[in-house]
Image (cartoon, rainbow, N blue to C red):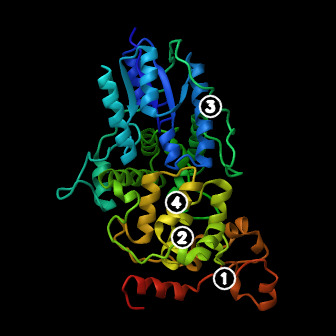
């Protein structure tokens, strides 16, 4: 009996799952497998929020498979070794999986391929994580990847999308292949108190609701901090409980300026993947413009702690950092502001901020996180590397009534707009009544330090 193994990685869904579809098309039964890779945990990527969300994803995936007559096999250990053991137990002759695009994923995939080939088995890798353009599929004439988004997007838009595959009606799984108990939802500890549950079923419900209430206004409302008008699909895209291909198909059918802006954001996700695949060192080293004068934990420890804790004295920055800890998520506009503040106003090494985000973000994706941090630090793909976002100006623009600030900084709940964005300017008696710090740095001082560090005159 032909029984392939389907290795789930960052694609924890049943709808539009190319590896599962390919395996079922030519098989009597399949073994759906997920391996808790110890190397991922050793590298620090199994942070509490992502571990908790993953538990929900696995529980939901197992439930969906059981509804179709199957089950999820969960193992822990070295991924290559566990896959090979399952292959032997099931007497499988092939493994299907989705392609990964980080250096870690590429090396792991090659180790798995070599081990399977040595045992006379085959590995089939499918494109299921990007939308239309796997890294390296389109390149400019003079390079192996695009370093600027706009020309990349022009080519990305012209690539035909594959058709969306529906969820299978049945997923027969042979007996005799054992695994660990599938984790219960919400079983992990140390997660943010308002972390959302993981899983494909909830993700699809979320898509339907957003298509009705939010997509049409995405282009005009997504930067409104208080309105919280973004899709919040990022965690589901990171874990693959939603298919980016299906989202683009649905958005294009829906049409309109909001849908177009939404699709453009998904293109950014593919753009960052092709940059990281071509330059894997960009996960930890300056991509374009090198800087070696960053302040570090040793030279700026108190400022860094204030930033992490949301006690910088700049309300919109502090609101965003507190949201991150409470929800394991942060509004995209707020991510830009907090990154600009740390890397340019405080002139702290962007890697310190990127590591803090990766610890807390449930959608902590290496390509998006590291390259967006480099964008704001002026070391990445931004064509205006010296731009600095003013937290007061930005707060007034994207939180004009101060509702976002007051939601996350209760010390300022009684301060109205526009004073809520500059509480240090309140009359002395009013300021003294607030349990809120003064700014840890003046914006002119921060800008002057940034310009001097970059070799520019004030």
Q: Are marks 2 and 3 in contact (CB under 8 Å)?
A: no
Q: Earlier in the sequence, mark 4 or mark 3?
A: 3
Say which element carries label 3. helix
Q: CA distance from mark 2 to mark 1?
A: 16 Å
Label 1 near label 2: C-beta < 8 Å?
Answer: no
Nearer to us: label 4 or label 2: 4
Q: Which residue is mark 1?
A: 422
Point out residue 256 in the picture as x, y percentages from the top left corner.
45, 52
Measure how far apart labels 1 and 4 are at the Cα level: 29 Å
Q: Earlier in the sequence, mark 4 or mark 2?
A: 2
Along the viewing direction, whichever of 258 and 361 lies nearer the viewer: 361
Q: Which residue is mark 4?
A: 355
Please report whichever mark, 1 or 4, sits nearer to the chain's N-terminal start: 4
* Secondary structure of residue under mark 1: loop
Residue identifier under label 2: 337
Q: Quadrant of residue 122?
A: top left
Disc 4 from disc 2: Cα separation: 17 Å
Q: Nearer the viewer, mark 3 or mark 1?
A: 3
Instruction: Please give the name of the residue rendered at 76% of the width and 90% of the height, measured from the top-left corner.
Output: 427
> Mark 4 falls on what kind of element?
helix
Which mark, residue 59? Answer: 3
Question: Disc 4 to disc 3, how far (Cα)?
Answer: 28 Å
């Amino acid at each position: 009996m032909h029984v392939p193994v389907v290795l789930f990685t960052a694609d924890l869904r049943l709808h539009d799952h190319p590896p599962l579809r390919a395996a079922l098309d030519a098989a009597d039964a399949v073994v759906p497998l997920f391996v808790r890779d110890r190397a991922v945990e050793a590298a620090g990527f199994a942070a509490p929020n992502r571990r908790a969300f993953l538990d929900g994803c696995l529980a939901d995936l197992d439930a969906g498979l059981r509804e179709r007559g199957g089950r999820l096999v969960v193992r822990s250990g070295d991924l290559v070794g566990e896959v090979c053991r399952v292959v032997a137990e099931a007497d499988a002759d092939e493994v299907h999986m989705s392609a990964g695009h980080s250096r870690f994923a590429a090396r792991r995939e090659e180790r798995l391929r070599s081990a399977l080939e040595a045992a006379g088995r085959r590995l089939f890798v499918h494109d299921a994580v990007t939308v239309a353009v796997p890294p390296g599929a389109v390149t400019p004439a003079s390079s192996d990847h695009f370093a600027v988004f706009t020309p990349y997007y022009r080519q990305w838009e012209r690539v035909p999308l594959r058709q969306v595959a529906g969820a299978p009606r049945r997923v027969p799984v042979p007996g005799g292949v054992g695994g660990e108990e599938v984790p219960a939802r919400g079983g992990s500890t140390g997660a943010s108190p308002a972390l959302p549950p993981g899983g494909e079923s909830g993700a699809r419900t979320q898509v339907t609701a957003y298509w009705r209430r939010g997509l049409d206004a995405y282009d005009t409302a997504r930067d409104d901090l208080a309105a919280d008008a973004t899709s919040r699909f990022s965690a589901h895209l990171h874990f693959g409980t939603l298919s980016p291909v299906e989202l683009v198909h649905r958005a294009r059918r829906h049409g309109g300026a909001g849908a177009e802006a939404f699709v453009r954001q998904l293109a950014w996700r593919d753009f960052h993947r092709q940059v990281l695949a071509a330059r894997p060192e960009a996960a930890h080293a300056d991509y374009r413009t090198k800087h070696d004068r960053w302040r570090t934990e040793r030279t700026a420890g108190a400022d860094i702690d204030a930033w992490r804790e949301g006690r910088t004295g700049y309300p919109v920055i502090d609101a965003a950092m507190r949201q991150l800890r409470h929800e394991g998520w942060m509004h995209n506009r707020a991510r830009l502001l907090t990154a600009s503040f740390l890397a340019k106003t405080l002139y702290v090494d962007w890697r310190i901020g990127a590591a803090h985000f990766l610890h807390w973000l449930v959608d902590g994706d290496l390509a998006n996180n590291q390259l967006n941090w480099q964008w704001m630090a002026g070391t990445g793909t931004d064509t205006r590397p010296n731009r600095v976002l003013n937290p007061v100006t930005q707060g007034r623009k994207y939180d004009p009534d101060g509702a976002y600030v007051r939601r996350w900084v209760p010390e300022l709940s009684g301060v109205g707009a526009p004073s809520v964005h500059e509480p240090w300017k309140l009359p002395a008696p009013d300021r003294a009544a607030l349990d809120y710090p003064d700014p840890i740095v003046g914006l002119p001082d921060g800008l002057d330090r940034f310009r001097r560090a970059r070799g520019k005159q004030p």
